[in-house]
Amino acid sequence: MPFIPHSEADVRTMLEAIGVSSIEDLFDEIPAALKGARLEQVPLGVNEMEVLRLMQERAEGDGRYLNFIGAGAYEHHIPSAVWQLATRGEFYSAYTPYQAEASQGTLQVLYEYQTMLCSLTGMDVTNASLYDGASALAEAVLMAVRLHKASHRVLVPATLHPAYRHVVRSIVSNQQIELIELPYCTDLGTMLPESLARFDREAFAALVIPQPNFFGALEPVHALTDWAHQRGALVIGAVNPVALALLAPPGRWGVRGADIAVGEGQPLGVPLAAGGPYFGFMACKQAHVRQMPGRIVGRTVDVDGKPGFTLTLQAREQHIRRSKATSNICTNQGLAVTAATIHLAILGSTGLRRVAHACHANLLALLERLKEVPGVRRRFASPVFHEATLSLSAPVLDQLCDHGLLAGLDLREHYPELGNAILVCTTETKTAADLERYARCLSAALSAAAGPAAA
Amino acid sequence: MQFPAELRYTDTHEWLRQEGDGTVTVGITWHAQERLGDLVYVENPPRGKAFRKGEECGVVESVKAASDIYAPISGEVVAVNEELTSNPEKINQEPYRAWIFKLRPSDPGELQTLLDAAAYQKLIEAESH
């Protein structure tokens, strides 16, 4: 919809009709002392030239790093065409474009996005996106409890991203839902089958399965899915969308497939941007669609039989169901999803598979090279996608950072039992030279930490 | 035909018919379906579950609204109308034939608390002012 501002004549006509002489008169209820009061702590403005200079100096002060950190947000190459198109005014400044009569273009993009995500996850229905992966998982937990109807307990592995566990706990704990944390196997870094045995006789509504998990390891998704289904519970997959180009998608886990699949969509064409905005994707089986939150775009025909797109199944949503709605959300991450759709359209399934292959190949090459570096060992024996957990003989991340290398995420905060362990990620953006630099810098830092006696 | 005399009614727009075998059949009235618009989905109460009078036991969903169905009297659900899964529009077409569920009443005394056709008609007329 175009933005049509008022002309001076329009404004004058309206003021006359209202019976005031200026726009300021409409605010006469506000005490004079409050209008235009000076904010004491805020400095006077600077002009555009000064702002640009300031920002440039600040950015240079940040430095430039070679980034090997993943842990939920991933550095991938975004083809230039993605944001060239996504920043077109029709997409970039559209305001809540959900009305069928005014926003066919946007609705079509959302429908295409939904179709692509269904294809990627192997699920039947996708919504038009939620805020991010973590809150999408919280919505999935709420949805699974609604669907299960009998139990309010959800099993959440310790191998799930700590921030996701924290967000889910914040959102569901006041809704009488009990989250039970499952420990991990210290050899494999995946869920421990023995810890599941106690639930052979105790009811639970759902099992959350991250794939890959926070340690970068691949969980035994088929066995876990079948086990949960045999106990009458639902399965929620929390998945990395790029990994799905190579791994079995949630819709094909076990005999029946996962019931709900969620994840962080940032790797699909959304820049790291200091943490956001990102988008959460959510998909489910057809039978569960009426309990899925979020906008859903459907394809239909208009009164003249011409094809078109519209929001559908709106009676789930809070603007109609109110307190009985599936969620309070009544929006989606439109711009991020537009970028993701263009990104996926440019890559295609072949291109996405090549990206995933390159990520995986880089990790294997790095791990192979690190075998020659004393003081580094792989902590877990499981297969991995593009992240792995390394045990180091000394904590050297700060020293590596001083040399412009972000060598991995320090795991001591959330998994102190692992000692000096880091989570390293390689995406397709890393070259052979980058991997070599990583190995040499890490080797140098570790020998320096060991001291001259160790050489 | 909007207020069949042989039925009983609630102020939440359900109708109830007493059957020969002691069960009761429940649906929603012409007035309810007219206000909801084209129905697209009916969430039946689960068979075997017991409800108290006035308790929410199901949902009818149209393109513009989702409305709870309330148990007109206390009882156990003994049957649900499977036809409505694929043809919810039958409620719009024939609201007094497209039943939703059947109950075995736990307290037949509650039947006295329901409205008869005349009282329900008065309620509707009062509401539309």
Image (cartoon, coloured by chain):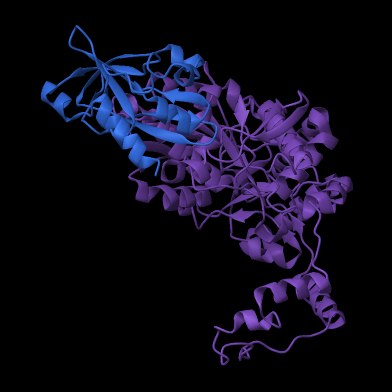
Chain colours: A purple, B blue
Q: Is residue A406 left or right of residue A169?
A: right
Query: Can see residue A365?
Result: no
Viewer-nearest residue: A106 or A287? A106
- The residue that appears at 69% across and 79% down in the rendered structure is A23
Viewer-nearest residue: A278 or A286? A286
Q: Position of residue B53 (x, y in %)?
A: 21, 31
Q: Position of residue B28 (x, y in %)?
A: 37, 25
Viewer-nearest residue: B58 or A55? B58
A34 over B85 or under it: above or below:
below
Query: Can see residue A40?
Result: yes
- The residue that appears at 37% across and 17% down in the rendered structure is B96
Q: Where is residue A349 in the image (x, y as percent from the top left)?
A: 79, 28
Q: Is residue A207 left or right of residue A401?
A: left
Q: Is residue A253 left or right of residue A243?
A: left
Q: Where is residue B13 in the image (x, y as percent from the top left)?
A: 34, 31
- The residue that appears at 75% across and 86% down in the rendered structure is A45
Viewer-nearest residue: A125 or A321? A321
Quadrant housing residue B26: top left
Quadrant housing residue A28: bottom right
